[in-house]
Image: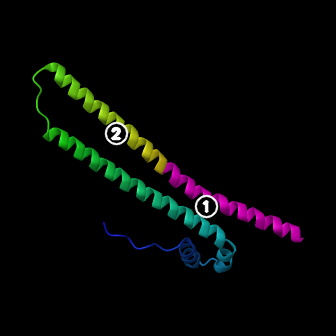
């Protein structure tokens, strides 16, 4: 899959949007909120990167599962008695269940990591903004 070029930054998008709407002092407004917009952009990029890695891992999991099913189907020989057939089916069901459980746990961990990283960027910026506000009041 071809890599898409990086899109405009939030600053560029808001700047263009403000100019298109002929908002007065749009650059001054953006300068005032620059850190917030940059944090929002980093958070969005972290979320997108997490989603990309999640989709990639899910594709790998699906390929592994299809390969295992294909291998099992190719090596399958009809057993001579019903007891052997039930044993093989039970083993296949057990392996499938274990793989699904493992994959679900891994996917949940990837989602959690991606969300945590994205939220932490915003949380950090909020803390910085609160400190900026406090220091502004302390000066008065």
Q: What is the quadrant of residue 99 in the picture?
A: top left
How is the protein colored in the picture?
rainbow
Front position in the image: 13 or 90:
90
The residue under the point 33% across, 48% down is: 61
Q: Is residue 96 above or below residue 125?
A: above
Relative horizontal placement of residue 51, taking residue 83 as reference (left or right): right
Q: Quadrant of the C terminus?
A: bottom right
Residue 20's x, y, as percent?
55, 77
Q: Main secondary structure of the magenta part?
A: helix
The residue under the point 65% across, 70% down is: 35
Q: Is residue 9 above or below residue 79?
A: below
The residue that label 1 is drawn on is: 121
- Membership of 121 in magenta stretch: yes
Looking at the rendered structure, the secondary structure element under dot 2 is helix
Q: Quadrant of the N terminus?
A: bottom left
Q: Specify start and end residues of the magenta stretch as a single range.
A: 111-140
Q: Of the residues under marks 2 and 1, which one precedes in the sequence? A: 2
- Membership of 48 in magenta stretch: no
The residue that label 2 is drawn on is: 99
Relative horizontal placement of residue 129, taking residue 61 as reference (left or right): right
Tell me if mark 1 has few (under 14), some (14-19) or many (20+) residues whose alpha carbon lies within 10 angstroms of its own.
Answer: some
Residue at mark 2 to residue at mark 1: CA–CA distance: 33 Å
Tell me if mark 2 has few (under 14), some (14-19) or many (20+) residues whose alpha carbon lies within 10 angstroms of its own.
Answer: some
Looking at the rendered structure, the secondary structure element under dot 1 is helix
Q: What is the quadrant of residue 43 in the picture?
A: bottom right
Which tag is nearer the camera, tag 2 or tag 1?
2
């Amino acid at each position: 899959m071809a890599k898409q070029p990086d899109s405009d930054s939030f600053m560029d998008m808001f700047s263009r949007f403000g100019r298109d709407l002929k908002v007065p002092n749009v650059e001054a407004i953006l300068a005032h909120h620059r850190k917030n917009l940059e944090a929002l952009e980093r958070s969005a990029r972290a979320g997108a990167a997490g989603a990309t890695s999640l989709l990639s891992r899910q594709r790998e999991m699906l390929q592994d599962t299809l390969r295992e099913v294909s291998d099992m189907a190719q090596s399958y020989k009809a057993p001579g008695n019903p007891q052997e057939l039930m044993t093989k089916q039970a083993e296949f069901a057990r392996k499938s269940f274990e793989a699904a459980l493992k994959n679900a746990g891994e996917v949940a961990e990837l989602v959690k990591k991606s969300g945590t990283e994205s939220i932490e960027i915003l949380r950090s910026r909020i803390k910085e903004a609160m400190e900026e506000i406090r220091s502004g009041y302390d000066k008065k």
